[in-house]
Image (cartoon, grey):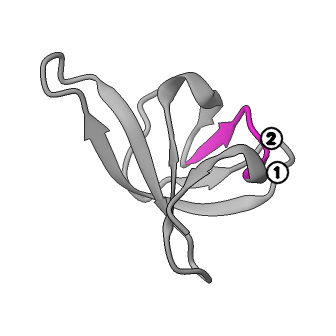
Amino acid sequence: MDIEVDMKVVDKTGKTLGTVEQVINDMWSGEPRKYVIMMPDEAGALFFKPDQVDKVEKGKVTLALAAADIESTG
């Protein structure tokens, strides 16, 4: 299953991080390179890569990382 905009994202503990706001594709291959999560209650964004995903279910992405280990702009 592909990761799409508006999918809910949770960390490995089940903590809700937000929803996928944008998919950043590789310029040459067209494959997803990063995903952007806009955090609902905070300024800034979180980023995760395809290899940081544990599983994708209908409407939900579970990451293999804890929230504190995810790249952020905030």
- The residue type indicated by label 2 comes to Lys
- Callout 1 touching callout 2 (CB < 8 Å): yes
Identify the residue shown where x is 56% and y is 41%.
Answer: 58
Identify the residue shown where x is 55% and y is 22%.
Answer: 51
- Report the magenta residues as a range: 60-67
| Horizontal and vertical percent position of residue 66 | 79, 45
- Kindly indicate the quadrant of the structure image that contains residue 20: bottom left
- Kindly indicate the quadrant of the structure image that contains residue 42: bottom right
The label on residue 60 is none
Q: Is residue 4 above or below residue 42?
A: above
Judge left or right: residue 68 versus residue 29.
right
Name the residue that disc number 1 marks.
Answer: 14
| SS under mark 2 | loop
Disc 1/disc 2 C-alpha distance (Å): 6 Å
Identify the residue shown where x is 74% and y is 37%.
Answer: 65
| Horizontal and vertical percent position of residue 23 | 32, 45
- The residue type indicated by label 1 comes to Gly
Name the residue that disc number 2 marks.
Answer: 12
| Horizontal and vertical percent position of residue 59 | 54, 49
